[in-house]
Structures are given as structure tokens and as C-alpha cells.
């Protein structure tokens, strides 16, 4: 057998690939991440980590570094619809700062608030930060300037062919150039919307392509943020027929302008028109991009898996693209680790495609919902919108009335971010399964709800809860499975083994070598939210099973949730 250079080879060092590498490294899995560019991208692309992503980064121990590098946590996240920055806004939607949301979360006892609020951070800030963290994570090798070319796979692993192009010495590798071959047990394509790995597998993208082409231009303007007369904010949408939008980047000195335009000169003109006052600025870059709503027909092929934009492409409206990719990485990380470490059964890794593709479809739907809301109010634009006439006033009032409903569809998606639930998963005991509690499937929470309602229904993310000492439940949970026993340990079910049920479950996990921790908690608020005496949490904090008593066959329960 050809020796393995690494356990997992990750192609693409964007936020998704780097997050996966960091998680795998922390779990003791050898991984190598390769990126064709010589350095992280200088383009903004995404600019917000949502609440679920920030919870994930907190569990990885890197949330403070991301907060420190991003948009000031005391600044508001307000959204405006304007004709110009110097004119009274047509609509002002206030949204709280990170500091305000953290204070709100600290007082919440019913799970409705996330442990971590969102964080505005530009991709050109996030990627270098994640790269440095990955380079300092044990078991991780990072190689930029390495272009993936092709792969071959067999029953034992994957052989990848790549080319190092004048690559400098990098963490884990000496300076090299020329063709190289890497042998890995698994290959993960995090190589973006034009994924070479997806194309080699012959996997099609399904959905709506080429919906709209826009320019994205990056400007630097040192004093604009402080001088905006209508107030600080995150997004400034221009009520025009060119889909113009100005986004404040994390430094508060850089801004991205999205608009339909013929050329770069027109972009400059549009920026000056919407600012509406003399400012000193420089346009650093301008690139065309196209909106898509697409999901890969498959997320895997034997030992090759897809994650992030290689598996799904979303309109940035609603900010679901990169955040969905981070969710892919965290779902995949523990399943790869369990498979490689021998405690995961064959259905563990298979469940990645089942769970994450349904989330890709769902979140593409959420992106469509948000973008349709924005199109709805933009369709109310009329050429007289800026005129000081009765007709102009009527146009402005009508657009603002529509936008007060429709623009919220872009900015208020907490249910999509936190309320998602894995259904029909081979490693979850949903009601109707012989091992599951006797819940009525018809009473299941809606996994597509826009507003967030905390739930412990199997497949859901465990809601945020505070313990009696003021610490977060999430912070007390390790990287393996956790059985939460809420109150006194229940008695053995009639006909069960003589050993206490909890001890029997621990033995069943130990038979596979799967990590299981037992936590006994007495907090009434958690028991009220759980509605059951016990919850079995997966390493990604999704609920695999719940009940008032463990099933008689605890071995079957351990087998199912570990993929055997």
C-alpha cells in the first residue's frame, strides 16, 4: 500500500477549508490544506459571521480573536434605504450592536437568544486570521501556492496530483516547485463555485443560474463612516434601478459598492452620486460577479466530499453562503474524525451528504426568500423618487412602506441560522423510530421557519442555556457525545439489563471506543426547555435522541448514533 502523506487533504483555503482544517487538527486528525493562491484573497466577498458560525468559532476557541479583528462590537448594525447618504433616509431599520446582543443573551433563560451574536468581519480579514490559526494548530499542514490538478481514488484512499508554483517555505513544508503527488485517506473539495473536484466527479449543480450580474468595487475612504449625516450603519441600500448597495467593511474605512454598471468609470460616478458630498477616496479594486441559487446533486463520491461553495452557491442576500459552508465543515469534521479513529460506523460519514445537502437546499431557499424581498421593494422604484414633488413624495412613501416589510426578510433570518433541524438522518432517532420517544411527528417544529423557536426535537441544535454558576452549557461540553441527565437518574426500564441504564449506555459507547460524557444537571430552566429527562447530544451539539428513560436496547442506540 502506498503510504499516506495525510489523513485528510483539503483543497481550498477559504474560510470553509480553514475551519475544517482547524477542527480536524484539534480532533487529532492529520490534515493538509492546499491553496493555489500565494496568499489569502484581498477581496471582501463575505462580511458577516452569523450567530451559529460564531457559536462554532467559540467552541474552537477562536471567537475572541475574530471579535478583535472585526467591526467594533459597540457599533450598531443598522440598515438604511436611501437616495443619497446626505438625504433623509427612506427607511431606517435599527439593529443592535454585538455588545447589546451579548447583554441580552446574558439575561435570557429560555434559549431564544444565541450564545454568540453575529460579527461583521470582512473575508480579507477573516482568511488571514484563520490561516494563522490553522498554521499553529497541531496536526495541520498549510500550503499556499499549490494548485490542485486531478485525483484518483480507490478503496483505500485518494491520490491527488498538484503543482507547486514558486511556493515559498510554508508551515509544514519546505520551499518547493513543480509537480507533486499527495496520498490521503479522504479528499475534501472546498475549492469554490468553479470546483475542479466537483467537475472531475461529474456532479451537476441544480437550481437557478446567472440570475443577475453585478460589479463589486472596494473603496477606501478614511472619514466617510464618521461623516455620514444620517448615522452609522452596516448597509446602505440605494433606491435606484441599478441594485446599488454600499456595505461598511470591518475597518470602517473600507466600503464595498455593489451595482449594475457598464465599466469602472460608471462605478466611480455611482459612488460619488450616492455619497452626495465631497470625500477623498480611492477605488482599490472592481470585479464582476454573478448571482446563483444552486446546490450540487451529490455531496460525495466514496472518499471524496464537497463542502462550501463547491456544494452550494447562494445570493449573498441574507448572508447564508459562507455560514452554510462553515456548518458543512463542522458537520464533516467530527464525522471524518470518528471514521478515521475507528469508532464511527459506515453510516456516520454517509450521513454528511444526507444532512448537509438538505441544509444546502434549505438555505438556498432562505437566500431566495431574502432576495425576493429585496426585489419586491426595489420594484417600487420610479424615476421621480428623488424629486421634491408630490409625485416624488408618493413614490418614496410607497417604496418605504413596502421595504419596511420586505427588507426585513434579508436581515431577520434567525430561524434559518439557528432553527435548522436534520431530518431523515441515519444517525438520529426521530419520533417514529423504534428507539425514539413517543412524540407525535406532526408536532415537529418547522425546520424552514424564519423566526427562531428553541427546541430539543431530535436533529435540532441544542439551544443556548446558562448554568447556575453563570457559565454557558455549550462551554461545558467536550468534543464527543454528551448524555445530559436532567435531574435524578431514571430507573431501569422493565425488562432491561440489571445495570443502571446510563452505565449500560456508557458501556455500549465504550464497545466502539466512541467518546461519551455523562452530565447530570439540575437547572430547572434546562429541564423545562428540554421537556424530557435526558438528551443525547452529538459532538456538533445537535440532538441525536431524547427521552424520559433510555430504551431497553441501549446498545442499539449507541450503534445508531455512531453510524453502525
Image (cartoon, helix red, strand yellow):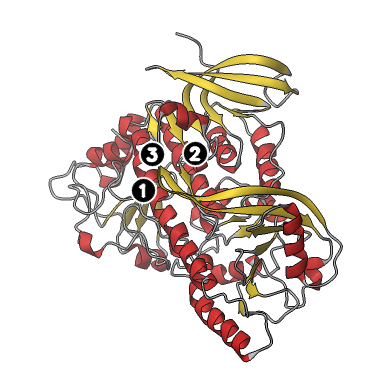
Could you say which is closer to the camera, residue 362 or residue 432?
362
Camera sees residue 449 = yes
In percent of width and height, residue 387 lies at: 68, 83
Which label belongs to residue 358? 1
Q: Quadrant of the C terminus?
A: top left
Which residue carries the number 3 mark? 352
Which of the two residues, 111 or 44, is positioned nearer the viewer here? 44
Q: Label 2's element?
A: helix
Name which quarter of the figure residue 20 lies in.
top right
Q: Nearer the viewer, residue 354 or 504?
A: 354
First in sequence: mark 3 vs mark 2? 2
Residue 461 visible in image:
no
At label 3, counting other C-alpha atoms closer than 10 Å, the crowd grade (few under 14, some 14-19, many 20 or more) is: many
Q: Quadrant of the N terminus?
A: top left
Tell me: residue 110, above or below residue 22.
Answer: below
Name the residue: 50% across, 78% down.
402
* Mark 1 or mark 3, whichever is nearer to me: 1
Task: Find residue 510 and report its horizontal and vertical position in percent.
Answer: 35, 33
SS for callout 3: helix
Which is nearer the N-term, disc 1 or disc 2? 2
The location of residue 385, given as percent across then percent down, is 63, 79
Q: Give the quarter of the image for residue 356.
A: top left
> Residue at image x 49%, y 31%?
188
Q: Which residue is mark 2?
A: 310
Which mark is on residue 116?
Answer: none
Question: Quick one: 395 or 87, which is closer to the camera?
Answer: 395
Q: Residues within 10 Å of mark 2 (few under 14, many from 20)?
A: many
Label 1: element kind: helix
In front of the other: label 1 or label 2? 2
Describe residue 389's horizontal placement relative to residue 561 as left or right. right
Q: Residue at 47% across / 58% down in the picture?
A: 367
Amino acid at each position: 500500500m502506498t503510504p499516506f502523506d495525510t489523513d485528510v487533504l483539503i483543497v481550498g483555503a477559504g474560510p470553509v477549508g480553514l475551519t475544517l482544517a482547524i477542527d480536524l487538527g484539534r480532533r487529532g486528525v492529520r490534515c493538509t490544506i492546499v491553496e493555489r493562491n500565494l496568499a489569502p484573497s484581498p477581496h471582501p466577498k463575505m462580511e458577516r459571521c452569523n450567530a451559529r458560525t460564531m457559536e462554532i468559532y467559540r467552541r474552537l476557541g477562536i471567537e475572541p480573536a475574530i471579535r478583535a479583528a472585526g467591526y467594533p462590537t459597540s457599533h450598531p448594525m443598522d440598515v438604511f434605504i436611501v437616495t443619497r447618504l446626505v438625504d433623509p433616509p427612506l427607511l431606517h431599520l435599527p439593529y443592535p450592536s454585538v455588545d447589546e446582543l451579548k447583554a441580552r443573551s446574558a439575561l435570557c433563560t429560555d434559549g431564544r437568544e444565541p450564545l454568540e451574536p453575529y460579527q461583521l468581519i470582512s473575508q480579507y480579514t477573516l482568511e488571514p486570521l484563520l490561516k494563522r490559526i490553522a498554521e499553529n494548530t497541531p496536526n495541520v499542514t498549510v500550503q499556499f501556492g499549490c494548485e490542485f490538478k486531478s485525483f484518483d481514488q480507490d478503496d483505500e484512499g485518494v491520490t491527488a496530483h498538484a503543482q507547486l508554483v514558486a511556493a515559498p517555505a510554508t508551515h509544514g513544508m519546505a520551499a518547493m516547485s513543480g509537480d507533486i503527488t499527495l496520498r490521503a485517506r479522504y479528499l475534501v473539495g472546498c475549492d469554490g463555485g468553479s470546483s475542479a473536484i466537483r467537475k472531475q466527479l461529474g456532479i451537476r449543480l441544480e437550481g437557478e443560474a446567472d440570475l443577475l450580474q453585478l460589479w463589486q468595487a472596494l473603496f477606501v475612504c478614511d472619514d466617510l463612516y464618521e461623516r455620514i449625516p444620517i448615522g452609522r450603519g452596516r448597509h446602505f441600500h440605494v433606491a435606484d434601478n441599478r441594485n446599488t448597495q454600499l456595505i461598511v467593511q470591518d475597518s470602517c474605512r473600507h466600503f464595498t459598492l455593489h451595482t449594475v454598471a457598464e465599466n469602472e468609470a460608471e462605478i466611480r460616478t455611482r459612488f460619488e452620486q450616492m455619497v452626495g458630498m465631497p470625500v477623498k477616496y480611492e477605488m482599490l479594486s472592481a470585479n464582476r460577479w454573478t448571482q446563483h441559487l444552486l446546490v450540487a446533486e451529490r455531496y460525495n463520491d466514496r472518499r471524496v466530499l464537497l463542502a462550501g461553495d463547491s456544494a452550494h452557491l447562494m445570493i449573498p442576500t441574507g448572508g447564508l453562503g459562507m455560514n452554510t459552508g462553515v456548518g458543512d465543515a463542522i458537520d464533516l469534521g467530527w464525522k471524518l474524525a470518528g471514521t478515521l479513529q475507528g469508532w464511527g460506523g459506515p453510516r456516520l460519514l454517509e450521513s454528511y451528504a444526507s444532512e448537509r445537502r438538505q441544509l444546502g437546499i434549505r438555505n438556498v431557499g432562505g437566500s431566495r426568500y431574502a432576495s425576493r424581498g429585496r426585489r419586491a421593494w426595489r420594484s417600487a422604484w420610479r424615476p421621480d423618487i428623488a424629486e421634491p414633488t408630490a409625485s416624488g413624495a408618493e413614490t418614496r412613501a410607497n417604496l418605504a412602506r413596502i421595504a419596511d416589510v420586505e427588507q426585513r426578510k434579508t436581515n431577520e433570518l434567525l430561524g434559518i441560522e439557528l432553527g435548522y433541524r436534520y431530518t431523515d438522518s441515519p444517525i438520529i432517532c426521530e419520533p417514529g423510530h423504534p428507539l425514539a420517544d413517543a412524540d407525535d411527528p406532526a408536532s415537529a417544529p418547522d425546520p424552514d421557519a424564519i423566526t427562531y423557536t428553541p427546541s430539543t426535537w431530535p436533529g435540532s441544535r441544542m439551544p443556548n442555556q446558562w448554568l447556575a454558576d453563570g457559565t454557558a452549557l455549550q462551554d461545558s461540553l467536550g468534543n464527543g457525545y454528551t448524555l445530559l441527565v436532567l435531574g435524578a437518574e431514571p430507573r431501569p426500564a422493565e425488562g432491561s439489563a440489571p445495570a443502571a441504564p446510563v452505565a449500560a449506555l456508557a458501556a455500549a459507547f465504550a464497545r466502539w471506543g466512541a467518546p461519551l460524557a455523562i452530565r447530570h444537571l439540575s437547572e430547572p430552566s434546562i429541564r423545562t426547555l428540554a421537556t424530557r429527562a435526558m438528551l443525547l447530544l452529538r459532538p456538533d451539539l445537535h440532538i441525536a435522541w431524547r427521552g424520559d428513560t433510555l430504551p431497553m436496547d441501549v446498545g442499539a442506540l449507541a450503534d445508531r448514533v455512531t453510524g453502525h
